[in-house]
Image (cartoon, rainbow, N blue to C red):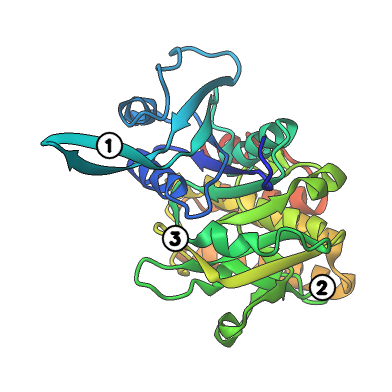
């Protein structure tokens, strides 16, 4: 493709069209140009495709009815121009010529973040790109983000590079980069690295969210793709735990990416209509902790105590008590037994 290591961004989007355009624009403005972008549209219904067409990222709209994912390709001209006047006539000369391959994949159903990243990583890897830079649609890399990562491309021990994640107010979002404690994997698999570590030039980490994680294709060849059946939550942690078994994950603090819609992590009770989302996080966490924990007796004890506390909280504070209890116990048992039935939570709660 070119003499440099090729980089393909993978952006998963669902019903956040304006944020998606901001993300794509930031990718196209990188001081170290990227070679391609995979846009995985997880069956958005907010006019995402129409806005992509309006902004030149696709050339035509996908069909309304799809039985399987559809991929569309466009060669996107990302030239910057200098304008000057010669005898009163405006002349535009190219300042930077960069052709970016845009691949738009319209999914035929919402496969969740995990399904979207599986699809994008698989397609980018199979096209032969040497690095895959994965992120959600609410991420916006700084203009020099990729340039600051590129210095580490040739380090043979590295399997993935990570940016610092920045909140909209400019603070570091510490929960996105961490270390795994294999003796204390429940209820928190990773412990965020301390703030002072961000003053270093590099930091070895175990885990990183899919907000600006840059993965080497040779590592993907060895460990495969993200688990699509995780649907949402902890799919990124699972993938990093596989990556760290074959090489180093390195945080480059000076390389930054803004995360504009951070998830709500407060402890308020979850309203019933949104409760189905909780299932995946608990189930996937238990699957990982059960697999990697080095102190199984402590893990099972914590599961028991957590279950009792959850049931007591439901009985004292929540509506739909019987269904909530069934839902909680099902997510725990499915995690312990490694069952990945993504239709189950809605069936329990609403059918």
Q: Can you identify the residue that label 3 sits on?
A: 142
Where residue 232 appears, as percent x and y from the top left, is 60, 47
Residue 15 seen in the current view: yes
Would you identify the image quadrant in which residue 307 lies?
bottom right
Q: Residue furthest front?
A: 87
The quadrant of the picture occupied by the N terminus is: top right
In terms of sequence position, does the residue under pointer 3 or pointer 2 come before the other?
3
Residue 238 vs residue 145, the one in the foreground: 145
Q: Can you identify the residue that label 2 sits on?
A: 182
75 relative position to 231: left or right: left
329 to 42, vertically: above or below: below
Residue 132 vs residue 34, the one in the foreground: 34
47 relative position to 244: left or right: left
Residue 331 vs residue 319, the one in the foreground: 331
Would you identify the image quadrant in which residue 177 lies?
bottom right
The quadrant of the picture occupied by the C terminus is: top right
In terms of sequence position, does the residue under pointer 1 or pointer 3 come before the other?
1
| Residue name at image x 54 percent, y 74 percent | 174
Give the number of the disc on residue 92: 1
Where residue 346 appears, as percent x and y from the top left, is 56, 37
Q: Which is in the foreground here, disc 1 or disc 3?
A: 1
229 to 239, vertically: above or below: above
| Residue name at image x 65 percent, y 54 percent | 214
In terms of sequence position, does the residue under pointer 1 or pointer 2 come before the other?
1
Where residue 73 appears, as percent x and y from the top left, is 53, 23
| Residue name at image x 38 percent, y 28 percent | 45
Task: Give the alpha-carbon distance from disc 1 to disc 2, as whole Å.
Answer: 58 Å
Residue 343 vs residue 63, the one in the foreground: 63
């Amino acid at each position: 493709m070119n003499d440099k290591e090729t980089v393909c961004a993978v952006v998963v989007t669902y019903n956040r069209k304006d944020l998606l355009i901001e993300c794509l624009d930031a990718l196209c403005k990188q001081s170290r140009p990227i070679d391609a972008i995979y846009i995985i549209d997880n069956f958005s219904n907010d006019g995402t495709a129409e806005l992509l067409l309006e902004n030149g990222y696709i050339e035509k709209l996908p069909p309304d009815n799809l039985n399987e994912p559809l991929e569309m390709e466009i060669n996107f001209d990302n030239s910057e121009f200098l304008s000057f006047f010669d005898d009163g006539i405006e002349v535009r000369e190219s300042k930077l010529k960069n052709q970016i391959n845009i691949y738009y994949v319209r999914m035929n159903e919402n496969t969740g973040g995990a399904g979207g990243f599986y699809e994008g990583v698989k397609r980018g890897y199979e096209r032969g790109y040497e690095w895959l830079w994965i992120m959600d649609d609410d991420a916006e890399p700084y203009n020099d983000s990729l340039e600051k990562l590129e210095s580490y491309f040739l380090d043979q021990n590295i399997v993935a590079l990570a940016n610092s994640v920045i909140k909209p107010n400019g603070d570091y979002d510490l929960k996105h980069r961490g270390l795994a404690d294999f003796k204390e994997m429940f209820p928190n698999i990773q412990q965020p690295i301390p703030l002072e570590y961000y003053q270093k030039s590099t930091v070895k980490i175990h885990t990183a969210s899919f907000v600006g994680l840059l993965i080497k294709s040779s590592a993907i060849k060895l460990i495969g793709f993200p688990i699509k059946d995780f649907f949402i939550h902890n799919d990124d942690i699972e993938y990093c735990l596989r990556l760290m078994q074959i090489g180093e994950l390195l945080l480059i603090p000076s390389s930054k990416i803004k995360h504009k819609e951070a998830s709500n992590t407060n402890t308020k009770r979850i309203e019933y209509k949104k409760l189905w989302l909780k299932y995946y996080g608990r189930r996937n966490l238990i699957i990982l902790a059960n697999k990697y924990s080095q102190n199984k007796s402590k893990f099972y004890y914590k599961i028991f105590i957590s279950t009792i506390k959850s049931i007591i909280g439901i009985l004292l504070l929540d509506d739909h008590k019987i269904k909530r209890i069934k839902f909680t116990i099902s997510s725990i048992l499915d995690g312990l037994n490694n069952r990945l039935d993504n239709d189950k939570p809605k069936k329990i709660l609403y059918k």
